[in-house]
Image (cartoon, helix red, strand yellow):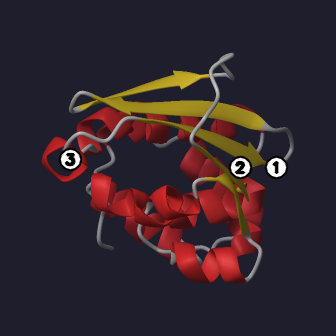
Amino acid sequence: MSDNSNGDLVDELSGLDFAVVSPEEFARIVRSLSAGQLGEIMRGDLRTRVLSEVFGRMRQQFRPEAAGQLKALIRWKITGESEEVYETSIADGTCTVRAGRSDAEPRTTLVMGDAEFLKLVSGNGNPVTMFMMRKLKVAGDVGLASGLTRYFDIPKA
């Protein structure tokens, strides 16, 4: 895919049915693209589809045995052509996800650009490195944020 021009790449990914792309395949796609290419594809309808699919899968990727008695609301702010907000609520061994911002106070808020978000959720980005390089901003419980990856099955590309 990286041999394509950005326009061809957007066309190719626009035609992809993300519902049938495995987490591992998604991780390989993200790994094959530069940050610039990731930013390019995260526009308009394709961005909406990708974010919906990623957050829609969080429930299936959730590892209740790892979360134990954890109770937390995590707010995700993904910046790019616009700011998209999603919330992940972990409680009683379940994970629920909602689009938009609730009135509840999150235990931690993660703020990152489109490329960083895709790298993080696909297992292609190190959250600590991203934080240290200021590509990932954390408000609230930094300890919870640093351990979030253990509560989800993150694909290995």
| Residue matched to label 2 | 42
**Going from the N terminus, do you reach mark 1 or mark 2 first?**
2
Label 3 is placed on what type of residue?
A: Arg
Residue 113 spot, x, y in % from top left: 75, 57
Disc 1 and disc 3: Cα gap in Å?
29 Å
Q: Residue at x 47, y 43 (%)?
A: 16
Q: From the viewer's perspective, is 148 left or right of 157?
A: right
| Residue matched to label 1 | 80
Q: Work out whether residue 150 or residue 92 is closer to the camera in this orientation and state it.
A: 92
Disc 3 on helix, strand or loop?
Answer: loop
Asked if residue 129 is positioned above or below residue 146 in the image, the reply reads below
Asked if residue 106 is positioned above or below residue 101 in the image, the reply reads below
Q: From the viewer's perspective, is 129 left or right of 30?
A: right
Q: Are marks 1 and 2 in contact (CB under 8 Å)?
A: yes
**Going from the N terminus, do you reach mark 1 or mark 3 first?**
3
Number of other residues with Cα within 10 Å of mark 3, as a class: few under 14, some 14 to 19, many 20 or more:
some
Residue 58 spot, x, y in % from top left: 36, 39
Disc 2 and disc 3: Cα gap in Å?
28 Å
Going by the picture, which residue comes out furthest to the top? 103
Number of other residues with Cα within 10 Å of mark 1, as a class: few under 14, some 14 to 19, many 20 or more:
some
Q: From the viewer's perspective, is 63 left or right of 20?
A: left
Residue 144 spot, x, y in % from top left: 47, 56
User: Which disc is residue 63 wearing?
Assistant: 3
Disc 1 versus disc 2: nearer the observer:
1
Number of other residues with Cα within 10 Å of mark 2, as a class: few under 14, some 14 to 19, many 20 or more:
many
Disc 2 on helix, strand or loop?
Answer: loop
Q: Residue at x 67, y 63 (%)?
A: 115
Mark yes or no: residue 34 visible.
no
**Total marks placed:** 3
Disc 1 and disc 2: Cα gap in Å?
8 Å
Label 1 is placed on what type of residue?
A: Gly
Disc 1 on helix, strand or loop?
Answer: loop
